Image (tube, grey):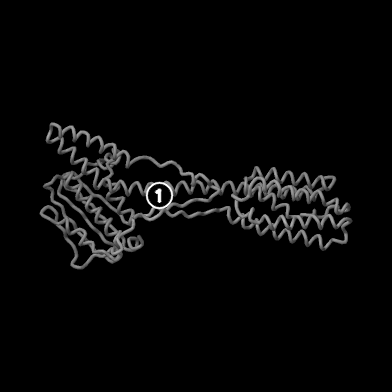
Amino acid sequence: MPKRERVMRMSVEQPLWRALTGYRVLTLLYAIGLFVKARDEYLRPWVAIAYFAVLAIWTLATLPRVAGAATCTKRFLTVDLAVALTGILLTPVADPGHGDGPTLPSIWTAGAVLAYALKGGWRWAAVASALVGVANIVQRGAPSQDTLHNVLLVWVASIAIGYVVEVARASEATLARALEIEAATRERERLARDIHDSVLQVLAMVQRRGTAIGGEAAELGRMAGEQEVALRTLVAGGLVPASRASEDASLGALVREVDEPDSDPDDRGPRDLRTLLSPHAGSKVTLSEPGAPVLLLPAAARELAAAVSAALDNVRRHAGEDAQAWILIEDWPDEVIVTVRDDGPGIPEGRLAQAEGEGRLGVALSIRGRLRDIGGTAELISVPGQGTEVELKVPRGKAEKK
């Protein structure tokens, strides 16, 4: 039974939301502390006390709202900014001689603007900071140098943070799409290898035998050939469309892991590669192996053995049923090397690239693809008239991590 697909979430902006939560609490305490220190200077301290009571309740009650983009709605942002603007405009009411001193909400107001930046990017931040700037100028009565300096500082900082958030979201969406494409491509290559090792070979055999027999069998062979071409086109097809998850950057980048089917519970220990390759030995295939077991982890051993089977199948198909083949297993401390050699006519120069372009992916997927998946390499050496040699290398360190 296949394992479930695991999805891991990453988000660059989530730490910013957590920082904003802490910022709102700390700036609330700071604003209250400023008022307590200068309380005797206020003409109407009860106005400030009433405002701070509302501000404290609002700040603590809405902490879950600023925990992430999903909970920080437009309605909340509107009310939150209204609370900040109200505090700014109430400052001269509580203290007509306020002058150039801090407003009632003080730097708490910046938290409301930053929430706009995190939620909607630099455009939302520009609008919110502009409204805060207008409110500051109104409560001062006339624009002063300090007021303009503070307004400009909040405006630039909020726009910069909003822009950074937009870039982060775009990067997360791009990363999610790239990882999704990679996962889909690897799964398609795995399926293509399995199809090449079974269905495509059967269809090719039916086509050849049907053409040779003739009659109704020839028509069956023709249909098999058409299905082979269609199936090759399918397994070599294009990219899958973007998923809804990868397009929603606010949820964070999604990293999809497509798991292989569960292996046999008893198949957990190292496997002797010799036992997997020994069935190939016969009158046309000579197997040369060390006198000691060649141990690899099950997944690496199976993939390496399947690549050898694909190489031998290519020998039978392209060099003929009478071709002689040799398998050599070399067990080195740092790697295992399996060489498959035949005495066929060899491969003409450029033939592999042409076959891959036609959708014939035997070497690309069934051999090189399998070795790549277990951290190994496959090298094919062929000289016309002198046979073909396929060298498969699996480094032990990489294979043991698979």
Residue 399 spot, x, y in % from top left: 32, 61
Q: Secondary structure at mark 1?
A: helix
Check disc 1: other Cα within 10 Å, few if <14, some if 14-19, many if 20+: some
Asked if residue 247 is positioned above or below residue 16 in the image, the reply reads: above
The answer to which quarter of the image holds residue 200 is top left
Residue 254 spot, x, y in % from top left: 48, 51
Q: State left or right for residue 178 relative to residue 153.
A: left
Q: State left or right for residue 75 relative to residue 395.
A: right
Residue found 82% across the figure and 63% down from its top: 37
Q: State left or right for residue 71 relative to residue 241.
A: right
Q: Residue furthest bottom?
A: 292
Quadrant of the drawing holding the C terminus? bottom left
Residue 20 spot, x, y in % from top left: 65, 56
Asked if residue 266 is positioned above or below residue 387 in the image, the reply reads: below
Q: Is residue 220 or residue 317 the one in the foreground?
A: 220
Quadrant of the drawing holding the N terminus? bottom left
Residue indicated by mark 1: 183
